[in-house]
């Protein structure tokens, strides 16, 4: 629903226009004080500003200048009771979309408002398109050294040009949404919207209204019609993450939307045709949910026309260091990337990565934050990763955990344990040294002195 800021210091005009525009389904914010309007423009977003030209202490031209500076994509209509060509031309030169002469004709006013809003939507869509084209989620950016990921890339190439529904399966953090975005980016729909929703993140009633929209009065708080994601993604792609969490009662309505290519808003009677490609993802095998009666069999076969499976990172170790190099290059750009010491490499290779690519990315960002002298050493890796690998190695050894300290002094042993604990506390505070110092009950200067020196 389009949002309009209406400004006029004549209460009668303000009331008439506000009632008229609200009757057309617009979200109208009427303000009689132009100073207050200036503040609202600073704090809130609007699709259209309609303002009278002659007001005090701030004029409509002042509001126009402010709007053009702060909200350059917002359309502006100027109202003038004088019909002055000079005033209208000056307003247009300053960026106004059009002007309205008082007294106005209702039909002409509504048409002008509609044209201004359509212009705003066009500008916004162009900005969205440029953002999507410049986004990092591109097919070329998928790291695929392992045979399994190369097969995934081949499947993306094959299915992207089609409108077939695709089910992407894999553990959390394996990159299911990245694959979905790559499919969209190489489809005929690439110039339209890609919208995503996590079915596990919303309660049933909210999920239904988000997907299908609702009509005014459908429930308490539904003060106006609202389009759902199916309508918003018209001509583009809708990605449903964790589709296995979709309630059974909603699965039937979703299946109908896929089959009939139409939706019905919550509380509405009319059907709305939609042209949307649906991609879905799950980290739980849907076959298991079907046997438990928690997922419809007919819906499963409808969404899994093509199935792309992403293996966990522990099953494709060939991708670990290519992914690390990609992450570091992305973070460093043209700067010289840091070297990874052999000890740190060994730990990164031995870790089982239960959080998959997402955990790997977070671990490398953590290491880059604490690295010095352009090197990634063991001490700057997250403590839980280092400890996990060390415990695993100790479990495979017949030696006592203290054997590694044989021949070393008590001071060396205590210093090593102190370093481990420092890294643990820093990882818990997300690298915030001031917070870590408070938890350790030491000064910030002392913490800096105790931080491990690079190799």
Image (cartoon, rainbow, N blue to C red):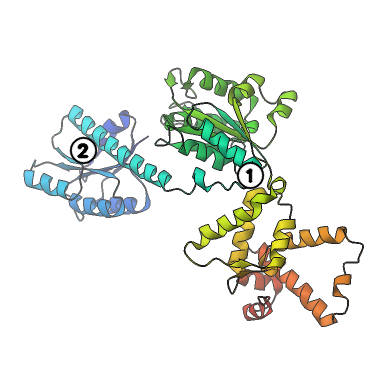
- On the rendered image, what quadrant is the C terminus found in? bottom right
Which residue: 73% across, 73% down?
419
Which x, y percent locates residue 340? 64, 66
- Which residue carries the number 1 mark? 174
- Taking the image as shown, residue 399 lies to the left or right of residue 22, namely right
> Which quarter of the rendering shows the N terminus?
top left
Q: Looking at the picture, how far across and down is residue 354, in whole percent?
A: 71, 49
Residue 221 visible in image:
no
Location of residue 312 with respect to 425 vertically, above or below: above
Nearest to the observer: residue 182 or residue 177: 182
Mark sitting earlier along the chain (2/1): 2
Asked whether the viewer can see residue 200, the reply is yes
Q: Measured from the top left, where is residue 127 in percent x and y?
A: 35, 45
Q: Secondary structure at mark 2?
A: helix
CA neighbours of label 2 inside 10 A, class few (<14), some (14 to 19), many (20+): some
The residue located at (50%, 24%) in the rendering is: 266
Image mark for residue 354:
none
Between the C-alphas of marks 2 and 1, the distance is 58 Å
Taking 28 as reference, is 443 above or below it?
below
Q: Give the SS element for disc 1.
A: loop
Dividing the picture into quarters, in which one does residue 294 lie?
top right
Q: Position of residue 235 (x, y in %)?
A: 41, 29
Mark 2 or 1: in front is: 1
> Dot 1: within a 10 Å radius of its alpha carbon, few (fewer than 14), some, or many (20 or more) residues?
many
Would you say 312 lies left or right of 368 here? right
Q: Is residue 241 above or below residue 262?
A: below
Q: Which residue is mark 2?
A: 13
What residue is drawn where x is 47% and y is 64%?
A: 334
Q: Is residue 378 left or right of residue 400?
A: left
Q: Nearer the viewer, residue 388 or 215?
A: 388
Q: Nearer the viewer, residue 376 or 145?
A: 145
């Amino acid at each position: 629903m389009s949002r309009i800021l209406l400004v006029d210091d004549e209460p009668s005009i303000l009331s008439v226009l506000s009632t008229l525009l609200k009757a057309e389904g617009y979200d109208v914010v009427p303000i009689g004080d132009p100073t207050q309007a200036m503040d609202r423009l600073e704090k809130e977003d609007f699709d259209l500003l309609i303002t009278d030209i002659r007001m005090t202490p701030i004029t409509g031209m002042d509001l126009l200048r402010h709007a053009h500076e702060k909200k350059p994509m917002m359309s502006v209509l100027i109202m003038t009771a004088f019909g002055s060509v000079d005033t209208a031309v000056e307003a247009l030169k300053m960026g106004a979309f059009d002007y309205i002469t008082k007294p106005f004709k209702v039909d002409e006013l509504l048409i002008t408002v509609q044209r201004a809003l359509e212009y705003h939507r066009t500008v916004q869509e162009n900005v969205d398109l440029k953002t999507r084209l410049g986004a990092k989620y591109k097919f070329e950016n998928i790291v695929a050294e392992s045979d399994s990921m190369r097969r995934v890339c081949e499947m993306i190439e094959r299915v992207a040009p089609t409108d077939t529904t695709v089910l992407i399966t894999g553990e959390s953090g394996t990159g299911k949404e990245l694959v979905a975005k790559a499919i969209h980016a190489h489809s005929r729909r690439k110039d339209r919207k890609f919208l995503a929703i996590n079915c596990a993140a919303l309660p049933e009633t909210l999920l239904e209204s988000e997907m299908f929209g609702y009509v005014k009065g459908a429930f308490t708080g539904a003060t106006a019609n609202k389009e759902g994601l199916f309508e918003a993604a018209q001509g583009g792609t809708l990605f449903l993450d964790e589709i296995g969490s979709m309630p059974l009662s909603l699965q039937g309505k979703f299946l109908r939307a896929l089959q009939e290519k139409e939706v019905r808003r919550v509380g509405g009677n009319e059907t709305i045709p939609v042209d949307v490609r649906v991609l879905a993802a799950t980290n739980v095998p849907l076959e298991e949910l079907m046997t438990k009666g928690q997922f419809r069999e007919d819906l499963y076969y409808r969404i899994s026309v093509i199935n792309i499976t992403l293996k966990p990172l522990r099953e494709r170790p060939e991708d670990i260091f290519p992914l690390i190099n990609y992450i570091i290059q992305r973070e460093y750009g043209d700067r010289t990337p840091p070297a990874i010491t052999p000890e740190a490499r060994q730990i990164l290779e031995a870790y089982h990565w239960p959080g998959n690519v997402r955990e790997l990315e977070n671990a490398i960002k953590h290491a880059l934050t604490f690295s010095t002298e352009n090197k990634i050493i063991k001490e700057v890796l997250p403590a839980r990763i280092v400890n996990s690998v060390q415990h695993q190695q100790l479990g495979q050894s017949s030696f006592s955990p203290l054997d590694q300290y044989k021949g070393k002094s008590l001071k060396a042993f205590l210093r090593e344990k102190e370093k481990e604990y420092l890294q643990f506390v820093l990882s818990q505070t997300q690298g915030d040294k001031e917070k870590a110092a408070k938890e350790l009950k030491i000064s910030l200067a002392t913490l800096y002195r105790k931080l491990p020196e690079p190799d």
